[in-house]
Amino acid sequence: MIHINNLSYQYPDGTLALDSVDMSIDKGEFVALIGKNGCGKTTLVRHLNALLTPTEGSVSVFGMDTKDKSGVWNIRQTVGMVFQNPQTQFVGTTLEEDVAFGPENLKLPPNEIRKRVDRSLREVGLLEYKTHAPKALSGGQMQRAAIAGVLAMEPECIVLDEVTSMLDPGSRGNVLDTIQQLHQSGKTIIYVTQRIEEILPLADRIVSMNNGKIEFMGTPHKYLASVESDIPAITNLMRKLKAKGFDVRDDVFAVDDAFLEILKACDKRKTETSDNG
């Protein structure tokens, strides 16, 4: 779906933000892009819908080169962006007006616009708030409203850039549930975050960046096997149990999987104890 070839990007002040990045993203994939502040994550995803264009190399979306200005509108219909601060995306006085903004720019018939608005708000659980002012919503509701605005454009891919960083745990969970449902419905998801623990159970692939380069690309399990620090608390617990002699996997990041591993290890110890009298 998306091909990134030898992508480098230098800001006007001379800062090299991306350095020879190569990457492909398949249709329907859930890719988590992780790394510390300043590593190049946001700069990279802004290339995916032509908000930025390469200094060197190329980015193509379904064969459309992002440097070709004639195709920018089609690219932005294909790849939708949701930013860290949802308030920067609001343009309407009510939620339904805001979500309708994109389809109206496509010059769609009024009936089609209404269908898209209601469908998008229903998908994020905000249909009952459609006459509310976007900025009167809670933080989590604002972020879901921003997602609805992107959904109304019916993109193939949705890029979410640090969308839970300013939310409380409850709101964060609601937004993540919405994103998971979108992925399960067939959307391609590219999720930028520093919270590795929240994304490991959802992602098909982890891409870790450092100093404008990709330093790791692989499955969540392979990622955990490759790092010693900044791991989820559950994984840390499993590693400590393994170090104590328990026969458990130490690449587990989901609570349910950890529970089953611990049960199996306890049962095994009971059996060994019984066999030894």
Image: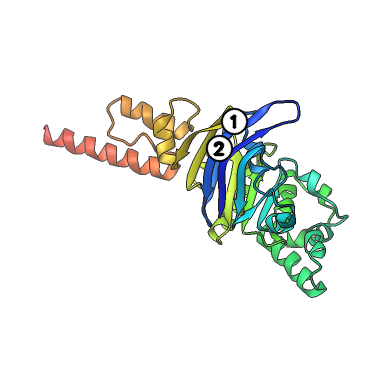
Residue 149 visible in this rendered orientation of the protein: no
Pick whichever, 194 or 256, lies toward us. 194
Residue toward you, 216 or 270? 216
Q: Are marks 1 and 2 in contact (CB under 8 Å)?
A: yes
Q: Nearer the viewer, residue 69 or 153?
A: 69
The quarter of the image holding the C terminus is top left
Regarding mark 1 in the picture, which secondary structure is present there? Answer: loop
Displayed quadrant of residue 102 = bottom right
How many numbered marks appear?
2
Asked which quadrant contains residue 150, the reply is bottom right
Check disc 2 and report its element: helix, strand or loop: strand
- Mark identifier at residue 212: 1
Q: Is 39 left or right of 69, judged from the image as shown?
A: left
Amino acid type for the residue under numbered disc 2: Val
**Label disc, if present, on residue 5 of the rendered structure:** none
Which numbered tag is attached to residue 21?
2
Q: Position of residue 53 (x, y in %)?
A: 69, 43
- Left or right: 17 in relation to 96: left
Upstream in the sequence, badge 1 or badge 2? Answer: 2
Q: Residues within 10 Å of mark 2 (few under 14, many from 20)?
A: some
